Amino acid sequence: MRLPRQRGTKTAGGEGPPVGLTRARRDNLTAYAFLAPFLIIFLVFLAYPVFYSLYLALHKVPADSFDIFGGLEFVGFANFVKLFADTKFWWSTLMTLYYAALIIPSGIAVSLALALLLNNRLKAVAVYRSAFFMPYVLDMLVVGIVWTLIYSPHVGILVRILEGVGITAFSEKGFLGMPQSAMPAVVFANVLKGAGFGMILYLSAIQNIPRSLYEAAEIDGATGWQRFRQITLPLVKPITFFMVIIGTISALNAFVEVYAMTSGGPNVDVGGKALGATWVTGYYVFDTFYNQFKLGYAAAMSYVLLALTLIVTVVNRRFLRAEI
Amino acid sequence: MSTRLSKRIRKILLYVGLTAAAAVVLFPFFWMAVTAFKQPGQAFAQEIFPSNPTLENFRRVLADYGFTRYFLNSVIVSTSAAVFATLFATLAGYVFAKKEFIGRDKLFGFLLASLMIPGMMYVVPQFAIINRLGWMNTYRAMVVPHLANVFGLFLMRQYMMTIPSELLEAAKIDGAGEWQTFRTIMVPLSVPIIATLFLLTFQFHWNNFLWQLIVTNVERLYTVPVGLAMFKSAHEELYTLKMAGSMISVLPIALIFFFAQRYFIEGMTMGAVKG
């Protein structure tokens, strides 16, 4: 007796009905026909570019050349060698780290605080929830431009409010014009815009915590803070890890907020070199490509970004497995 | 008695906290709107609400600075991208959820793995491909490269897996072909997720500034964000006009969000919770 052949596995010739298509083969054809539009776009615009980018990174791409398929001079790892000797690039990774170090904890804190506020039986909760979430769907470019107005020197609303309470440190150059405050200011704008996303995740995690845990803790005399530290925080840990992962990845991709608010500046003098206080790697890739048109160099840089992203993802996965 | 009083106080404090938080989070949008209605050149006037509100800024950006055209371009790009991206993801999601075929799981894993690739990675090679195809300064260039939405495919598959296969079997027994089954059974039952994905892709393309900037360099094809960025660098000091342009840029998405927030919130967080 022959075992029934599993559908979808390979069809060997000679089995199945002698004429026409076998059922399995027909199923395969139909499936790939449905998949075709998606797969074609995916292959051309998402899969191929990853390899093509490597090709670019290993070649010298003349700045005036638009026809950059084939015929380029192979330079091996020259772009990468140059990159690792490039102060601006190392500085950009440092700034990216700084950006991540600011935005991840503050993003988590604000999201969690909003979620805790919403986790109460109040009438208008849904309205507040929408209000907190809405900025997340709006355009980062616009948000950045609006903040340049708010952060303006001399006459901006924020420096005026601070002058009202006697703080004049930012009046002259504005928050975005000073190296010390530029990055925190960019991060602050971004945290307020993005907090709604983390808030929703935390809120659903908190609402999944059994009430009995809190009741038991209350009977044992735990204070509100203790209940938060001992019950809520450990039980929302998966969300926190997720926030760290996407926070790191978005720091590695940070571009629009910097473009809109500071263009990578203001400059700081580091050992005789002028380096931008918000010069993150994502912005450097853009600048190399769009302003300087060095495609090979930009491609090499984006490959380093990819490597960093993969490392972060793998390390975080390990952590996640170990912790949960 | 005292516990009831303290409960009341707690409630009031919560409302105060929530309102304060909302005020901070929404302040930039409030400030944008207030400034957009101020007299041109009066962006920094010493007042919270404009004493002499005007629509002049909107008239000027729409009539004199090309924002009408930019808006139209944004509508064309975002709508066509949303239609096709949703269609392709629905077709692909269906077979990943309900069909067995050679290489299915491997292919799906491969597609999902691509989600880890940082977006910045694509900028250079996609630009090169668009250039090679001769698509620079076309709507195609803005739309086509983003029509394979892997995250959307994932959402679609997850949703469609919950639809009972018996319904599809029943249709087949009744003599329906593959396409008919898909059209008459799968699509109607997947309307919520199709709507979600449509809105999410529309929103994504409405805000897809970097890519739209890269593939256009003629004003005729600027979308709202690109037009706004160009306006910003050309007229740094025209803040009231910039805020009017900003408002034109965010208003459509804010309105859609207002009416369809459930879809946005569920769609955007679904992947995170389930993945």
Image (spheres, coloured by chain):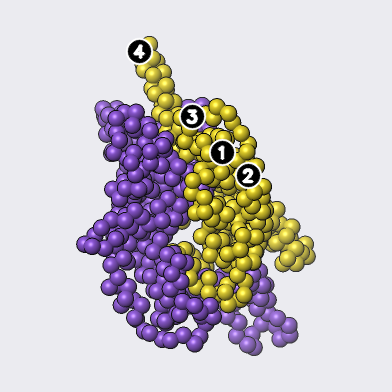
Amino acid type, residue under disc 1 in the picture: Pro
Element type at mark 4: helix
- Would residue A205 be found to the left or right of residue A218 on screen? right
Residue A284 in sight:
yes
Tag 1 or tag 3, which sits nearer the N-term? Answer: 1
Q: Which chain is yellow?
A: B
- Disc number lying in front (3 or 1): 1
| Rendered image: mark on residue B60 | 2
To which residue does mark 1 refer?
A: B40
Residue type marked 3: Ile
Mark sitting earlier along the chain (4/1): 4
Q: Which corner quadrant of the image does residue A96 belong to?
A: bottom left
When asked about the image quadrant of residue A25, the answer is bottom right
The reply, left or right, for residue B158 in relation to residue A26 is left
Residue B157, position as x, y percentages in the image: 57, 59
Most distant residue in the right direction: B175
Reading the chain from its start, which is encountered first: label 2 or label 3?
A: 3
Q: Are marks 4 and 2 on the same chain?
A: yes
Q: Position of residue A272 (x, y in %)?
A: 23, 62
* Amino acid found under the numbered disc labelled 4: Ser
Q: Nearer the viewer, residue A100 or A86?
A: A86
Of tags 4 and 2, which is closer to the observer? 2
Horizontal and vertical percent position of residue A84: 29, 72
Q: How many marks?
A: 4
Task: Tell me which residue sits at (34%, 28%) in the image.
Answer: A164
- Asked if the residue under mark 1 is in contact with the one under mark 2, i.e. CB atoms within 8 Å, the reply is yes
Q: CA distance from mark 4 to mark 1?
A: 56 Å
* Cα–Cα gap, marks 3 and 4: 41 Å
